[in-house]
Amino acid sequence: MERIFQTLGLLGLGLIVLVSVIPGSLRPHTSMSGYAEHFAAYAIVATCLALGWRSPLLHAAIVISSFTIGNILEAAQLLIPGRSADTTSALFSGAGGLCGVVLAFLLVSVWRSAFHLPKGRGI
């Protein structure tokens, strides 16, 4: 199961990068605000990554990377036609990553409690 979450998380991260660097006219849009899109995308990816790699050290790296990658991709958008950079979007990306890791922790805790499983490594 961990391998599935690792794969989904890495594919999701690749999709975030791809959608972030294409011209604005080609980017898919949802009915959500841009900030909500950033938050949701990073939260989903971080949840998958945290469920795939259950090390507290890697969870910290996922959160830090969410903020870092969000800022790098926002800066890169200054070079892409039809795109603009927004530091608030980067903050929502990082916040989504943080919440995704917390959600993974809660999901694993509930799962273990419901099935009376012993505490394993990481979350």
Image (cartoon, helix red, strand yellow):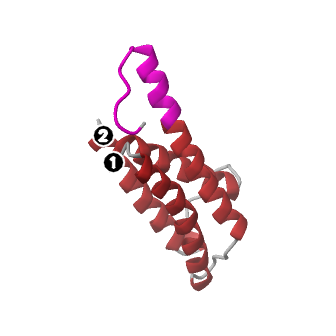
The magenta stretch spans residue 118 = yes
Quadrant of the image occupied by residue 81: bottom right
Quadrant of the image occupied by residue 119: top left
Residue drawn at (51%, 73%) of the image? 22
Q: Quadrant of the N terminus?
A: top left
Residue drawn at (48%, 49%) of the image? 46
99 or 33: which is nearer to us?
99
For badge 2, the amino acid type reads: Glu
User: Height in image: 84 above or below 121?
Assistant: below
* Residue with the mark numbered 1: 6
Gap in angstroms between the C-alphas marked 1 and 2: 6 Å
Residue drawn at (37%, 55%) of the image? 11
Label 2 crowd (10 A; few <14 / some 14-19 / many >=20):
some
Label 1 crowd (10 A; few <14 / some 14-19 / many >=20):
some
* Residue with the mark numbered 2: 2
Q: Quadrant of the C terminus?
A: top left
65 or 13: which is nearer to us?
65
Q: Are marks 1 and 2 in contact (CB under 8 Å)?
A: yes
**Left or right of residue 73, residue 118 in this image:** left
The magenta stretch spans residue 116 = yes
For badge 1, the amino acid type reads: Gln
**Left or right of residue 87, residue 99 in this image:** left
Provide residue 115's location: percent of width, then percent of height: 39, 14
**Left or right of residue 118, residue 90 in this image:** right
Task: Single out the residue that lies furthest toward the bottom.
Answer: 79
User: Regarding mark 1 in the picture, which secondary structure is present there?
Assistant: helix
In the image, which residues are magenta?
105-122
